[in-house]
Image (cartoon, coloured by chain):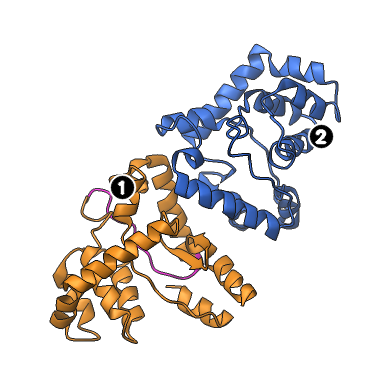
Chain colours: A blue, B orange
Amino acid sequence: MRIGQAAAGRKVAVKWRPFLLGPIFRAQGWNTSPFAIYPAKGRYMWRDIERRAARFGLPFKRPDADDPRSFPQNSLLAARMALVALEEPWGEGFCRDVFFAEWVDGRDISEAAVLEELASRYTAPAELVEQALSPGNKERLKKSVEEAAQRGLFGAPSFTIGNELFWGDDRLEDALEWADAIR
Amino acid sequence: MRIGQAAAGRKVAVKWRPFLLGPIFRAQGWNTSPFAIYPAKGRYMWRDIERRAARFGLPFKRPDADDPRSFPQNSLLAARMALVALEEPWGEGFCRDVFFAEWVDGRDISEAAVLEELASRYTAPAELVEQALSPGNKERLKKSVEEAAQRGLFGAPSFTIGNELFWGDDRLEDALEWADAIR
């Protein structure tokens, strides 16, 4: 939600790279989000996100703790669609809409119908889904996850500048400053 | 290292509360630091600390990965001594010296001799150790750890203002702003 404006302010070019956290968490021995595995840290993180959203004037609705479908959500189709969408000028808008649907409207983004409705703001949704499910695009996402692991990513959002890794919304400014300083 | 000046700038009073991470980590199922359990995250955290120390002009030396005694270090005696020291005006100075010894000079702060040398800058070290090892003080530290767990702490440094918890050096400014705003 914040990177577009922040990067423009620094004149830093940003390339969005969708990937999946599931395989990365599994490599650490986690079968779900660490928020769910470690309750003390999980409780803190939700509160921290809430406070930071308020600070930036961003809407945020905590997932319903009593609804196991509400968090974590399966983002496989969303990531595949995002990979295709990001070839288009409206790709980042589609990604923001998906985040908004999950984190503000409390919708279930694992559902194809939800993603298609969001995509229909920009394109013919059935075609986007068809491209997303092509063998070549599935392979592309797999490669993207492998590259994320190789680059040492263990969470999202992460920002890379060369071999330098920054993790978390709270490192966005540091990452942009780094990118600005080394050019 | 940063809280003294930052809190003074906001006119916020700070009470230092030594506690132990060991029992808190064990309650999460960790038998050592998560930096050691999760290598990808651990590698990132060391680099992050290094970058942040550079940003604040603070010296920092990474623990020697080949020396298992270098990290994590047993801080039981240090915490017990700090609890007594913080009753005195030089207590915070002693705490900073202990951090400096471990994180800059690469010394082993589990050693009583190292802690006594640091304490001798301020007081008669043998007396401080004697008070630190008294049954009453041991009990006090135990209570402090229990209170930390009850307040939802899962890492250090943590800052509490009433029931509001902030975790990490990177939340110091947020915590001080919160304390400033609610008074």
Identify the chain of the residue marked 2, using the numbered disc in the image: A
Numbered badge on residue B174: none
Question: Residue at 61% across / 22% down in the picture?
Answer: A140
Instruction: Kindly identify the amino acid type of the residue bearing the numbered disc 2.
Output: Trp
Residue A139 can be seen in this image: yes
Residue on which the image places disc 1: B26
Q: Is residue A40 left or right of residue B104?
A: right
Span of residues in magenta = B55-66
The x and y percentages for residue A103 are 69, 41
Q: Is residue B49 left or right of residue A128?
A: left
Mark 1 vs 2: CB contact within 8 A: no
Q: Residue B105's quadrant in the figure?
A: bottom left
- Residue B22 or B145: which is nearer the viewer? B145
- Residue occupying the far front of the picture: A66
Q: Residue B61's quadrant in the figure?
A: bottom left
Residue on which the image places disc 2: A90
Question: Residue at 14% across / 77% down in the picture?
Answer: B130
Q: Reply above or below: B1 against A125.
A: below
Residue B139 shown in magenta = no
Residue B57 shown in magenta = yes
Callout 1 secondary element: helix
Q: CA distance from mark 1 to mark 2?
A: 47 Å
Instruction: Kindly identify the amino acid type of the residue bearing the numbered disc 1.
Output: Arg
**Numbered disc total:** 2
Q: Reply above or below: A49 against B169.
A: above
The x and y percentages for residue B107 are 23, 65
Q: Is residue A171 left or right of residue A12?
A: left
